[in-house]
């Protein structure tokens, strides 16, 4: 279950006056867009190091004018973040703000040799502000497959609602791209990666300044992921109800076209009754999945604690959910 903790605070122009922060290559894409698969490919390269998702770098940092660097971390929330704990790195007690971010990046870089690449799903404009000089690989996938996969993960009950985080990520990308030089970003389509993996990976390697290595496709030897397969792209055509697809396309049609994905059918307006029915399906779908996989008490407990603004209790229930997620992923 994704954490809805995107940092939407206003950006502080004074950050640009600070010394340059460590500048990794950021792989940015919506959840379920293929970032894990790409991470495995990059990490298999002898000159690249991708330790995984690092959204915790921006999820828990806040503006703090009284702090030495102008920023401060919520260290309690950071320490309990599932993706942070998975990295098995320490939080230095004597550091905070951008100094702490530096230290965390140094610890991530020390996990392996080679150029540091990190994966992110949100807050890219903020990450680029805090990490001047960072370059970006924008991973783009058909939103219909992103939504299909999100429903299967229990993050949404309908395709219509599951497309929301794809839109949010793509709009963030538009903001970030406007601030980047053309040579500092490259786009990779998931579908192209499935159809021509060597060619696409060689292009991405050239962007990062390393030679392509055949070892990038050796990841099935040490993971549960198989080799790139064109059949993985476009699964929405056979695994989704056409009416549900039409609902999603009615919501995302304009942005889909901008990104090069043509809707499968003429746009059909959604009636008010249909929206109500979709909302009911969405709520019931997420509840059924959550109770079945995480248990009723943790699933509803984290939501009630959030509504009541009880962060300690929320972290308690979230830790129960995170523990079950880790068991599911093994």
Image: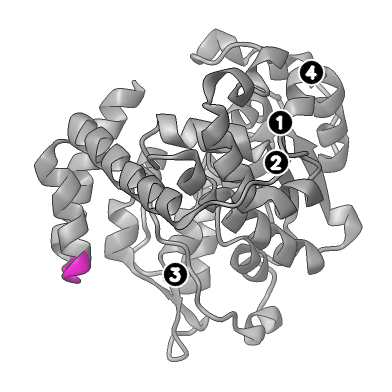
Which residue has dot 4 on it? 195
| Rendered residue at 15%/45% (across/down) | 298
| Residue bounds of the magenta highlight | 307-311
Q: Is residue 250 above or below residue 203?
A: below
* Residue 308, magenta (yes or no): yes
Alpha carbon distance from label 3 to label 2:
25 Å
Query: Is residue 267 in view from this perspective?
Result: yes
**Position of residue 323 measured from the top left corner of the image (x, y, whole percent):** 23, 36
Where disc 4 sits, the SS reads helix
CB atoms of marks 1 and 2 within 8 Å = yes
Query: Element at badge 2?
Result: strand
**What residue appears at the point 61 percent right and 21 percent down from the top-left corner?**
235
Color scheme of the displayed model: one colour
Percent position (x, y) of residue 45? 70, 25
Nearer to us: label 3 or label 4: 4
Callout 1: SS? helix
Provide the residue designation for mark 1: 190
Q: Earlier in the sequence, mark 3 or mark 1?
A: 3
Pick the front one: 5 or 130: 5
């Amino acid at each position: 279950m994704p954490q809805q903790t995107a940092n939407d605070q206003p950006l502080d122009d004074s950050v640009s006056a600070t010394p340059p922060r460590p500048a990794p290559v950021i792989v940015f894409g919506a959840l379920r867009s293929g970032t894990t698969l790409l991470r495995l490919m990059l990490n298999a390269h002898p000159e690249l190091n991708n330790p995984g998702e690092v959204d915790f770098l921006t999820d828990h940092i806040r503006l703090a004018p009284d702090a030495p660097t102008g920023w401060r971390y919520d260290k309690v929330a950071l320490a309990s973040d599932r993706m942070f704990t998975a990295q098995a790195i320490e939080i230095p007690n004597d550091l905070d703000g951008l100094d702490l971010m530096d230290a965390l990046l140094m610890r991530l870089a020390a996990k392996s040799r080679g150029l540091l690449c990190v994966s992110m799903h949100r807050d890219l404009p903020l990450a680029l502000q805090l990490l001047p000089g960072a370059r970006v690989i924008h991973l783009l996938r058909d939103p219909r497959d992103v939504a299909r996969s999100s429903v299967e993960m229990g993050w949404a009950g309908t395709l219509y609602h599951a497309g929301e985080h794809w839109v949010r990520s793509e709009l963030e990308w538009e903001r970030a791209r406007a601030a980047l030089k053309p040579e500092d970003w490259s786009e990779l389509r998931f579908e192209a990666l499935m159809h021509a993996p060597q060619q696409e990976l060689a292009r991405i390697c050239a962007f990062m300044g390393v030679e392509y290595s055949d070892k990038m496709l050796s990841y099935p030897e040490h993971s549960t992921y198989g080799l790139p397969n064109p059949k993985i792209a476009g699964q929405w055509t056979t695994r989704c109800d056409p009416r549900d697809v039409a609902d999603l396309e009615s919501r995302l049609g304009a942005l889909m076209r901008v990104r090069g994905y043509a809707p499968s059918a003429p746009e059909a307006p959604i009636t008010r009754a249909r929206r109500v029915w979709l909302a009911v399906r969405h709520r019931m779908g997420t509840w059924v999945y959550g109770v079945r996989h995480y248990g009723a008490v943790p699933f509803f407990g984290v939501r009630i604690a959030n509504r009541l603004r009880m962060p300690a209790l929320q972290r308690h229930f979230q830790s129960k959910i995170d523990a079950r997620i880790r068991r599911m992923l093994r």
